[in-house]
Image (cartoon, coloured by chain):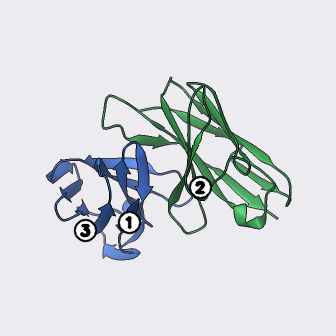
Amino acid sequence: SAVISQKPSRDICQRGTSLTIQCQVDSQVTMMFWYRQQPGQSLTLIATANQGSEATYESGFVIDKFPISRPNLTFSTLTVSNMSPEDSSIYLCSVEITGGYNEQFFGPGTRLTVL
Amino acid sequence: GQNIDQPTEMTATEGAIVQINCTYQTSGFNGLFWYQQHAGEAPTFLSYNVLDGLEEKGRFSSFLSRSKGYSYLLLKELQMKDSASYLCAAIEDYKLSFGAGTTVTVRA
């Protein structure tokens, strides 16, 4: 398994501002992902954070709105830009552990409320 | 893409058995995961099936039929702490697609 931390754990932000969420893993991992979980709903993949290259975004998510950095194999950031109340959600990072089932382990999440 | 269906909610009594079904339609399939998510917490990995058949892990078992696009998670000897949302997720290449989750409520 892996120990994953996220900062901040929660935040309340004003419309039009941006928030950067950090994800730190205690070991080097190849695959890191960012998900969104809106209230009462399941997880939706935003993008795959690639080390050394641009993130790969899923349909409906764009780099201008959700820029992602992956400077090394243990760290990634997701920025939620120009926020609106519709961005209120839980944002989770996950990592894939190779050698087992390739299951993904999730960070504790960042609960974002946009006023 | 993936289309994953599971019931919205289920209720059972302590000590009973509950079976959560999941059906999926996918253009490429590399396996199926089950996760447990307690309210306000991150999902935690429960099981993984890639071949047809039953995988047993203590009180939890998971079954897969690839030809039918069907899986179930079986929870035995239910405990109050099992009250949670259970997420079915299919993996295509390296990407997980999640169902909407089944909220299981265990009653005394």
Q: Mark 2 points at which residue?
A: A36
- Badge 3 local density, few (<14 within 10 Å), some, or many (20+)? some
Helix, strand or loop under label 1: strand
Tell me where residue B26 appears, x and y as whole percent.
32, 60
Q: What residue type is labelled 2?
A: Arg
Chain of the residue where label 2 is placed in the rendered structure: A
Depth check, mark 3 against mark 2: the one in front is 2
What label sits on residue A22 in the rendered view?
Answer: none
Helix, strand or loop under label 3: strand
Q: Which amino acid does label 1 sit on?
A: Asn
Q: Mark 3 points at which residue?
A: B19
Tell me where residue A60 appears, x and y as whole percent.
60, 59
Depth check, mark 1 against mark 3: the one in front is 1
Helix, strand or loop under label 2: strand
Q: Name the residue under label 1.
A: B3
Q: Which residue is at 66% across, 51% downward?
A: A62
Tell me where residue A73 appears, x and y as whole percent.
55, 24
Q: Which residue is at 38% across, 47% downward?
A: B45
Colour chain B is painted in:
blue
Q: Can residue A2 be seen in this view?
A: yes
Colour chain A is painted in:
green
Q: What residue type is labelled 3?
A: Gln
